[in-house]
Image: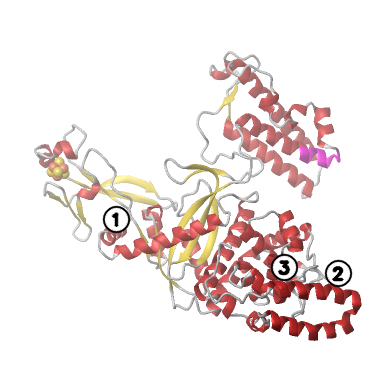
Amino acid sequence: MLGERSEQRGLWEADRLYLDHVGRDTFYGLLASLRGRLFRDADFAEFYCADNGRDSVPPSLLATALLLQTHDKVSDAEAKARADFDIRWKVALGIEVEDRPFAKSTLQVFRAQLILHEKVREVFESSLRLARESGYLKRRSMKVALDTTNILGRGAVKDTYNLLADGIVKLMRTLAAVEQTKVKEWAQAQGYQRHLASSIKGEAAIDWSNRGARQALLAGIVRDADRLLELSRQAQGELGEDSAERQQIVAAAELLGQLLLQDIERQSPDGDGEGDGEGDGDDGVSLRDGVSRDRMMSVHDPQMRHGHKSSSRRFDGHKAAIIVDTDTQLITAVDVLPGNAPDNLGALELVEESETNAGLPVAEAVGDAAYGDGATRQTFADAGRRLVARVPGRPNRKHFPKDDFVIDLAADSCSCPAGQVTHTMVPAGRRTDAAGRVHRLRAFQFDGAVCRTCPLRPQCIAAKGRKGRRVLIHPQEALLQQARALQQSAGYDEYRARRVVVEHRLARLVHLGIRQARYFGRVKTKFQLYLAATVANLTLVAGEIGLSDSVGGGVETHRAVPSDVNDVQAVSHGVAAHAAAIFGAVRLGQLWSQILFASALLPKAPSPSRAFRPGF
Ligand code: SF4
């Protein structure tokens, strides 16, 4: 059943006793001041049985613990230890010093529930709600900036030999579980023991400089995979159509099948390619040349992809996409994209989500050149939205680029660097844009007779034929022309400045650990990103307006705590008398120790500074 925290604060809760010692201007002090405001237990009621079982750990406490874990970048085991023994966590959680609030598994189950019920977005939204309630986010509309950064995936990246072995092991485990056998025994019975080694390549005692030996090893692995797939098909036939076990086998078999398909090339028995080469028994299989477009590189996290942030920066994992309100620097929406996806994937949806989360309309969105393609501009224009993004720079080519021609769409004319003007338009094929729309292209055609006699021809036309220069009209030519005009104007400086804001917020998220995924898969990585964005927003709001001292029901409570040691001692005598009647001598002894400890810690007056220390 849902366990709820009492609205009445206990006298011996750590935030009453040690708040100033820990620091009101720290993240721990901030969470203490927001207790009861940021999360309410009732918000998580759907996780629990309504009328049966023991009271749970209050979910508001667990949600706070997840934020602390993100802030401190610690494991589940360390989070549990800090909740038990770290006074800063106890202050933030608002528990008593001797409390041990949750087990590690409780935190893990709560996290799983948040993911399962898709509630983490609500946790994130609470940071924006707080920004609104505190007056930090009070504009009528937002100007947002979009950007992405890479996230290194959690799964181990393997070469093809070990990747196939991992896929084989995964399917073996599923089949062994169905037969209620240990995977080791199952593998032994079927002759698959070598795949259970930490590296099949390490176990293979072959001469790696011998191509034939490599081919034979690969062929053996593929043979094992094929035989295992056949066994899995037989196992599926013996299970019910909708049984969970069958679905698990199908998923593992599909994964192995996909690995074979992406990395292995098979040749027909009468083929004359590599497969018939020097290795005996290579079955005509060989490693596929190049990298498949959507190649999976980890069995443990099949959603990881090879990605490029630039021509020189390659990574394996996912992409974090965020939107930031450039006036307040608040992160208003996040998403996790495949590592090989373009940055602009789902940009419009992210803008729309941003509006929902923040409760404010977006007046305009700013992005870098990755958002400046014609298809993205058209998508935003069709939705009636303004997108400001740089048009990619002119390529360093030998001949006049298109930018050197003046295209007037209203007059259907094109002027060349030599001052010639053409009104002739010709068809120029079709193009499918990133959004899947097919466009019929047109081009301005200069007269061949004019170009033949032109002194600039060597700089303009590569071909030696008799035709004149052709200038392609982009399907979104008008939008690109508007963008070019804006980026050449003085007003564009404002957008450059706004775009920098999102880079700063990405740097903050990286500081909070999002460069490395903590979990497998994009859904859980998005969970991590949401929590990091929540912490980033909370510390931002607190830093900007001194939140930990100025808002919330906690304010009165905290200010009621005397900071002067004499006051504390005076109060403590009176409290002790009441406590003795309530708790008895043993409990009183513990309370006295807390009071004396608090007295020793509290002589320093709280810092008059309201500056927040987000990095504390
Ligand atoms: S070659 Fe033709 S299109 Fe090019 S500059 Fe000369 S006249 Fe203009």
Comes first in the chain, label 3 or label 2: 2
* Residue occupying image coordinates x 68% and y 67%: 64
Comes first in the chain, label 1 or label 3: 3
Percent position (x, y) of residue 361?
46, 73
Residue at which label 3 appears:
90
Quadrant of the frame with the N terminus: bottom right
* Residue occupying image coordinates x 83% and y 71%: 55
Residue at which label 2 appears:
54
Q: Tell me the distance, in whole angstroms, between the alpha carbons under discs 3 and 2.
A: 23 Å
Name the front one of labels 1 and 3.
3
Quadrant of the frame with the C terminus: bottom right
- Tell me the SS state at disc 1: helix
Name the front one of labels 1 and 2.
2
Q: Give the range drawn in magenta.
A: 173-181
- Tell me the SS state at disc 2: loop
Vertical comparison of 568 with 314: above or below: below
Side of 603 relative to 408 (left or right): right
Vertical comparison of 238 with 509: above or below: above
Comes first in the chain, label 1 or label 2: 2
Residue at which label 1 appears:
477
Pick the residue in front: 557 or 42: 557
Residue 85: say if magenta.
no
Percent position (x, y) of residue 600?
72, 72
Q: Which amino acid does label 1 sit on?
A: Glu
